[in-house]
Amino acid sequence: MLSTEKKAKGTAVALGYFDGIHIGHQAVLNKALEKAEEKGLTPVVMLFDIHPRKLLTGRVPPVLLSEERKRVLLKGMGFEIFDFDFREAMNYSPEEFEDRILLGELNAKVVVCGYDYRYGKGGKGSSETLKQELTPKSIGVYSLSPVYLGDEAVSSTKIRHLINDGEIERANAMLGDYFTYDFTVEKGDGIGHRMGFPTINQFFPEDFIIPKRGVYASRVVLDGKYYSSVTNIGIRPTVSGESLRSETCIFDFEGDLYGRNVEVSLLKFLREEKKFASLDELKEAVSKDIMKAKEIYKETEER
């Protein structure tokens, strides 16, 4: 909940689900920050306690960003977070949402959303109804047009397709940052260590998007320091693996990371996952992957 002081100040509210916080989302968020600064308001972003589609359809698309990481990024931008009880409010009419939430709970003076934003029972409310209802009350409503990368409109759906296809560089361009996850490091079977390439094992939550299986040049952040790395996403068929995981070899690092949440960013897809005839053949391939990953990391750092 907002403090009485911040609510009394008035708010600039960014509306949306913000999965991935891609460059389209960033346009909405930055507009809210701009208006908050201009008018002396508190910048606020609403976060749902459950994905709306979970209740409406029973199915949700894989998320691009963990809830914890989303909150860290939004707070880092300068937003206050308003947790929205979607179960309670899903049956609000558009007018009830405006009166109870935007005006009542948030004392909104500015509202910013994307062109396709919907709200209220049955999605009857839109950016146009926000303008019609709130503008006469001296509340600024800003509906932003889609953001394009080349000739394609940026969307979370498009980014999911790109990640599924291994087109990680284009996905990163739409995200405006590297596709990143920061799951807990768990114990593996030690095969990488015995081969001379110690790795960290991370497992994807059920609702999180899983990139195309294969090997990626990657980057790891540990205690604020960046490390070049190479990541394999898959089941490790050469060693008869079964559980799908992210397995990352961090260059120039030694230490125990078990139980820690480690941030891994994917930079470029290198090759498909493959079953090799022997561990020696696998070791040779990994050596080549490491050389390529180091070159790619150097190129990205020099840009």
Image (cartoon, grey):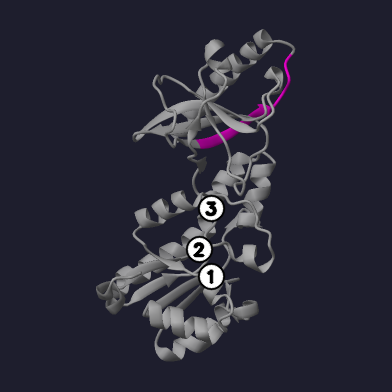
Q: Amino acid at mark 3?
A: Gly
Q: Are discs 1 and 2 less than 8 Å apart at CB?
A: yes
Magenta part of the chain: 265-276
Read off the residue under disc 3: 20
Question: As drawn, which residue projects farthest toward the top?
Answer: 280
Identity of the residue drawn at 41% across and 19% down:
252
Read off the residue under disc 2: 49
Q: Nearer the viewer, residue 283 or 111?
A: 283
Q: Nearer the viewer, residue 166 or 44?
A: 44
SS of the residue at dot 1?
A: helix
Q: Mark 1 vs mark 3: give the one in front.
A: 1
Q: Is residue 13 left or right of residue 199?
A: left
Q: Which quarter shows the N terminus?
A: bottom left
Which circle's residue, 3 or 2, is located before the other in the chain?
Answer: 3
**Residue 205: percent from left, percent from top:** 58, 44
Identity of the residue drawn at 52% across and 31% down:
218
Main SS, magenta residues? strand
- Cα–Cα gap, marks 3 and 2: 16 Å
Magenta stretch holds residue 287: no
Read off the residue under disc 1: 86
